[in-house]
Amino acid sequence: MWRQYYGPSSSNVSGGYIPLELGKEFRFAFYLPISKRFSLGVGVEYLSGSKESSLNITEGSELSTFSWNPKIQAYPIFAAIRYNLIDGKAINIFLEISAQYIFARYSDTQHLSSLGDIVDEYKTTGKGFGYSGGIGVEYFLIKNISFTIESHYRYAQIPKMSGELASRWGSLIENSSGTLWSLDIKGTENDVFNIILLSKEKPSGSDFQNVHETRLNLGGFRLSAGLAIHF
């Protein structure tokens, strides 16, 4: 972001923002067979991710460090339909589709070491819908316990995030609330860089472009493994 602001040829900028990606994922589900091939399921998932990154800016003999520490937590509640392509005694191969209702939390602590030591703490929440589909293999270890491997693709976006911002500048503290907005700003070499702002109203300015409510993207492919207990 700040590298784009100073321009790609700038030599006084090192490091930079590293995009946040989802990491850990846990899933608990209950399935009820309704026929030899079909089962209905309900369950809940837990998704999380965090990434620390920093950028150093040198102005003469002065060094400023800007750091980020974004974190995401999401709780999809889902209903699923599972179809057994192969229903054997030792191995099952199945297809599954699900619809999800998702609660999400996004937080970020941004720290600028210069200008009197500025700290901005964002805490926001949102909710939205998602869909998932994939294929899995189930191998029975014993009669009632099996090992499963599944590959899924999830499409899920949280269209709006709202919450609070606590800004500290030295001994001064300012609290505000609103919606999280994403926008582009022109840099010093006519480059464009993206920032987020928390505001009750849509931000406006002569240098602002592509202003919209921040969308949290939770989609993508995933590969998971686990144990299943059959009653």
Image (cartoon, rainbow, N blue to C red):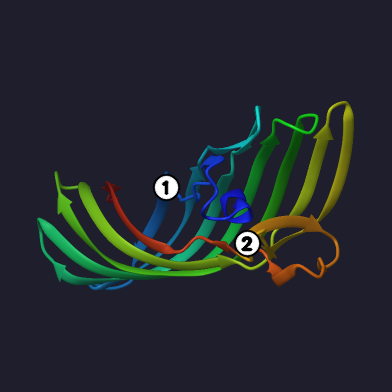
Q: Which mark is residue 25?
A: 1
Please state which of residues 129 and 122 is positioned toward the viewer in this rendering: 122
* Residue 175 found in image quarter: top right
Q: Residue at x 60, y 64 (%)?
A: 191
Mark 2 residue type: Glu
Camera-nearest residue between 163 and 142: 163
Question: In the rendered view, would you say 77 is above or below 12?
Answer: below
In x, y percent, where is residue 171?
88, 26
Q: Quadrant of residue 40?
A: bottom left
- Mark 2 to mark 1: distance in Å? 41 Å
Q: Which mark is residue 109?
A: none
Q: Which percent across, then down, holds residue 204?
A: 82, 69
Instruction: Indicate whether 203 appears above or below 13.
Output: below
Q: Position of residue 229 (x, y in %)?
A: 28, 47
Q: Is residue 176 left or right of residue 208?
A: right
- Left or right, 58 with respect to 154, comes to right
The mark that comes first in sequence, 2 or 1, is: 1
Q: Is residue 136 left or right of residue 215?
A: left
Left or right: residue 179 compared with residue 27: right
Residue type pointed to by label 1: Glu
**Badge 1 local density, few (<14 within 10 Å), some, or many (20+)?**
some
State the mark number for residue 189. 2
